[in-house]
Image (spheres, coloured by chain):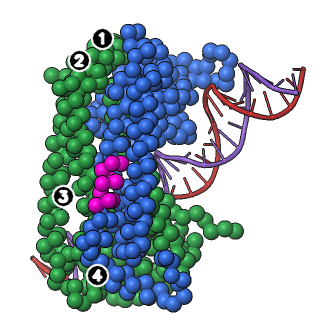
Chain colours: A green, B blue, C purple, D red
Amino acid sequence: MLKPSRPSNPLALAVLALLFERPMHPYEMAATLKERHKEESIKLRYGSLYTVIDALVKRGDVMVRATSRAGNRPERTVYELTPSGLDELRDWMRDLLRHPTKEFTQFEAGLSLLPVLPPEEAVSLLRDRALHLSGKVWQMEGQLAELAQHEIGAMTKQDLPAPLARQKFPPLFVVESEFRVAMVRAELAFVNELVRRITEEGWGPVDVWREIQTKCADQHETKEQPTRQ
Amino acid sequence: MLKPSRPSNPLALAVLALLFERPMHPYEMAATLKERHKEESIKLRYGSLYTVIDALVKRGDVMVRATSRAGNRPERTVYELTPSGLDELRDWMRDLLRHPTKEFTQFEAGLSLLPVLPPEEAVSLLRDRALHLSGKVWQMEGQLAELAQHEIGAMTKQDLPAPLARQKFPPLFVVESEFRVAMVRAELAFVNELVRRITEEGWGPVDVWREIQTKCADQHETKEQPTRQ
DNA sequence: ATGCGTATATTCGTGGGCGAATATAACGAG
DNA sequence: CTCGTTATATTCGCCCACGAATATACGCAT
């Protein structure tokens, strides 16, 4: 029988990447991901962690190195990367970086159904969103600036070549955050421009929009108390 | 007992939005979403469609209006929106548009594990990605331009107020596409800038990057045939 | 010493997403 | 008229994500 197909959960990729550095047990993987703030980019759920590790074992990408021992905490299982797991890690990374994949976002879904709301309300909601987004940009940039100063302690020491300790945190380890900021900025710009076009240019066109909107709403008759102020 | 919590699948929102226009049976909903290109923004799976409709029925947001009849195709069930479903539709839309929600993307996961690849390979992969992205921008803008010309036929006629028929397709109905283009453009800009910084500014810093990379790779010893050209 | 909060470490059950199978009828071609 | 193809319309079951439960041990205060 053939090798089962690669798990779709990116958490499995993180597991491979961590075992690329050194053997670890599951809880330690979780702790390491958190320490390095990778949980902000890769969804981490304990339940899923054990599930994906089992899957990787079945595929032969990962194997048990030793069971239990050390201190005397509850039983633990230490895993290590197999050669085929190393291949998988690289192939997977290549796919991920090379090929953009369509992903469905909540906001895009919302936008695509925009006509169900009256234009005034839509504008007001979008303005709220813009506020939230700019707050988030501000906050993320603060964190980035902070990291650039002193973050080096958040890496486990043995992971860094000696000369590096006590230096500034290499930007390499926060690329994903820079990416996220860039995306939020872009969304903010889009929302602002959209609001501007609706309010200043009657984009939609607004009169058609309102007409469609009320026509549908009327079918659901009478006693809707008016929600817009 | 309380109303079960709102389904998390945005397809359920699309169902509510469609029933806001008029009663429909599931297959018709799917056909309508496709006709309007909403499947590009809202993931549509037949299996999920029936699942979410059942869930909405259980919550009382949607109810059976009539069963079967018409032509004489296989049995069909026509649903309609209830008053509480209308409320739900609006509340949900408000949440969606107002509050940005963190979503995990494949690419962000890949970026966050970038150090597992040697810098040269990373650059080469990112360049590939940039090519794909710009191709996509080109293609999406082509589609948008095309829609702006003649698309009006893709709306079911009765959905549009009479005076509109045979006019240009209102931009209101393609906001989500404009959004997607904006996001892809932003990603492209980010990737180009990232490549530039790595190659021209030794960003990373590249020597540290390579050092970490090879140090880990060496643990997985010997006979890896070198993959980079 | 004893109790309790917290860190360590893993298992399990449920629910939902989705692929694949099922079933019927219209429709055109030979 | 019958055979293959496509459109219509829905059901079923597997698998995976994830919340919640479980279990042990350390450290610190009383």
Nearer to me, B129 or A109:
B129
Q: Secondary structure at mark 2?
A: loop
Nearer to me, B145 or A85:
B145
Q: Which residue is mark 4?
A: B208
Residue A205, quarter of picture: top left
The amino acid type found where label 1 is placed reads Thr
Q: Which residue is mark 2?
A: A225
> Do tags 1 and 3 sit on the same chain?
yes
Residue A11 visible within the image: no
The residue positioned farthest toward the front in the image shown:
B200
| Alpha-carbon span between mark 2 and mark 4 | 64 Å
Q: Which residues are magenta?
A: B184-193
| Residue drawn at x 41%, y 88% as measured from the top left | A69
B44 drawn magenta = no
User: Which chain is home to disc 4?
Assistant: B
| Residue drawn at x 33%, y 40% as measured from the top left | B179
User: Which chain is home to disc 2?
Assistant: A
Query: Which of label 2 and label 4 is nearer to you?
Result: 4
Contact, mark 2 vs mark 4 (Cβ under 8 Å): no
User: Which chain is home to disc 1?
Assistant: A
Residue A154, quarter of picture: bottom left
Query: Which of label 1 and label 4 is nearer to you?
Result: 4
| Residue drawn at x 17%, y 26% as measured from the top left | A200
| Alpha-carbon span between mark 2 and mark 1 | 9 Å
Q: Which tag, 3 or 2, sits closer to the chain's start?
A: 3
| Alpha-carbon span between mark 1 and mark 4 | 69 Å
Q: Which residue is mark 1?
A: A222
| Residue drawn at x 54%, y 88% as measured from the top left | B223
